[in-house]
Amino acid sequence: MPVDFTAIDFETANSSSASACSVGLVKVRDGRVVDRVHWYIRPPFPHDEFSEWNIRIHGITPQMVADAPGWAEHLPSLREFTGADVLVAHNAGFDMGVIAKTSAAVGLDVPDYRSLCSLQVARKTYHLDSYRLPVAAMAAGFEDFSHHDALADAEACAAIMVHAAMRHDVDDLDRLAHVTRVQFGAIGPVAVTERNAVHAPMALQ
């Protein structure tokens, strides 16, 4: 099944979308995981304060990221890993917001990415009491992972999208988005312009 994408998950130091402190990336080719990577990130000032609430959720402390590279150092590696892939995330608006806000916080241009939300796809694929990542992942046959570990969450997200494509009998993300009626998201000037052109009323095209 030629389902290709990169799944992504961020953890943040606090409620600011510019406080990325961890990221997990999982590359999928033909519906199979072919590569994965995890990095700790030193959040940029003034978004670098760790809230007790966030620490309780993901277990990452300031000491764990004190010597980690910052976002400006990680972004080129992220772009190399993802290439031209669509980014898939559970509640993708959050994760795409982290890329955009953290990039802006360190004075970098927001990179161009299309995205598709596995939470929205799961809502159109399964009949569940909850569509939280652990529940949706279980419906996709992916169980017993460490929720709020960025890499594990990215792997769970990938499993949902691959399983959803199988359930809907489609062979790429464009078809999956079409049959589930989930719109692609976009960040970055080029990607946003292209997305808006696709969804513009016919009279304006």
Image (spheres, rainbow, N blue to C red):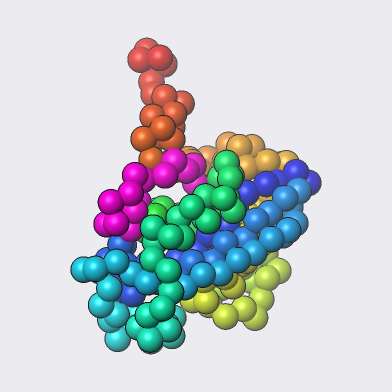
Q: Is residue 196 magenta?
A: no
**Residue 49, horizontal then vertical, whole percent:** 25, 77
Q: Residue furthest left?
A: 46
Name the side, left or right, on which 188 lies relative to 77: left
Name the side, left or right, on which 92 lies relative to 169: left
Name the side, left or right, on which 170 lies relative to 202: right
Q: Is residue 104 magenta?
A: yes
The residue range painted magenta reads: 100-117
Q: Is residue 85 above or below residue 28?
A: above
Residue 30 in view, yes or no: yes
Q: Residue 170 lies in what quarter of the image?
A: top right
Total tally of numbered discs in the picture = 0
Front position in the image: 101 or 32: 101
Q: Is residue 133 above or below residue 32?
A: below
**Residue 13, horizontal then vertical, whole percent:** 33, 75
Residue 94 in view, yes or no: no
